[in-house]
Image (tube, rainbow, N blue to C red):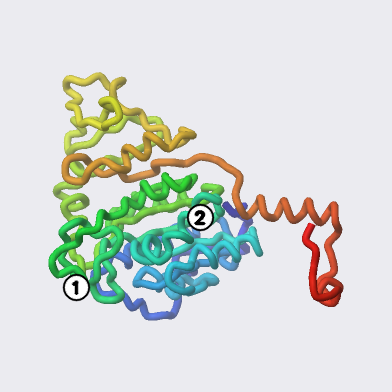
Amino acid sequence: MVTPTPSPLPLTKNDFKTDQEVRWCPGCGDYAILNAVQTVFPTLGIPKEKFVVVSGIGCSSRLPYYVNTYGFHSIHGRAPAVATGIKIANPELSVWIGTGDGDALSIGGNHLIHAMRRNLDVKVLMFNNRIYGLTKGQFSPTSEVGKVTKSTPYGVVDIPFNPLSVALGAGATFVARSVDVMSKHLIGVLQRAAAHKGFAFVEIYQNCNIFNDEAFEHIVGKEVRDDHLVDVEHGKPLKFGKARDKGIKLNGFSPEIVPLATTPEDDLIIWDEKEPSSALAYLIARMPEGTMPQPIGVLRAVEAPTFDASIRHQADEVQKKEGSGDLRKLLYSGDTWEVK
């Protein structure tokens, strides 16, 4: 988290728009995510020159071109590595990563999980459309079993990743999910992520209307979302349904849907995003799609030392003890060096 500093003039959404033509397919969910980012940034009290947007490769990774901040379009899956260097070099920067389910969880999976476990103070927006869109429709690590794509003409046989449970399992200190078309909810989640000091992972259900249209329509469509999504809110019981007449309780280690008409509210799961253990959040993140509602909102938000602050503190302590050193003297000291 970057400490807000007053700007000479209030920033607006237009300050974060660029002169670049937005080159996503008409109707793509990425437009809604871009709108949310450009809406949130001016509300954070951070000078524009202190934002950096980093990306890898994919449709989502065009994000740095469309947000008027500093940016870095890196290579496939390596955005977390680049963001790590940026944040350590200048901890006053607010560093955001735009990535997709393929970029983040396939070639970039190793980089992502280690940034999570280290609690690097960056914000990751993972656009999940369950497909490789930029390369024209191959299956991705989140594509469902049986999905017919250009690279799986007889259906996907891989078990897909659940992005939330990957983040929770890797130790991310902030884990959330939202939906591209639910703009108010998405903006609220991004503001929460921005305020978190540490690694913030936000999965966003995003529609690719060209290569995987309506991938989440059975969950997020206006007519069905009330019965297929549960918004986890800190300190509140897990309730859902068009009439808010259903709840979720634990039956042993299994979440279970119960009717509120016959179930005391005290029996429901009361959400605690600050619970040190991620076990319950993991159970809720893994609720089976189709038979259980899918969670949105902030699943976890806990405090822990950040990697970038720890690295800088260690360097400061060593310099106090050993001195700042002389690079020229070191380079000309001989063929071998002794590391203490």
Q: Which residue is mark 1?
A: 150
Mark 1 is on which residue type? Lys
> Mark 2 or mark 1, which has the lower sequence index?
2
Residue 106 x/y as whole percent: 37, 63
Would residue 211 appear left or right of 268 to someone viewing this image? left
Residue 289 x/y as whole percent: 21, 46
Residue 216 x/y as whole percent: 21, 55
Residue 295 sits above or below residue 23 on the image: above
Label 2: how many residues lie within 10 Å, few (<14), some (14-19) or many (20+)? some
Label 1: how many residues lie within 10 Å, few (<14), some (14-19) or many (20+)? few
Q: Which residue is mark 2?
A: 114
Name the residue furthest front.
336
Residue at screen point 15% across, 59% down? 146
Say which of 19 and 63 sits in front: 63
Instruction: Count the marks.
Output: 2
Say which of 48 and 139 sits in front: 139
> Callout 1: helix, strand or loop?
loop
Would residue 271 appear left or right of 82 to someone viewing this image? left
Question: Where the C terminus falls, by quadrant?
Answer: bottom right
Disc 2/disc 1 C-alpha distance (Å) = 31 Å
Label 2 close to label 1 by CB (< 8 Å)? no
Say which of 134 and 114 sits in front: 114
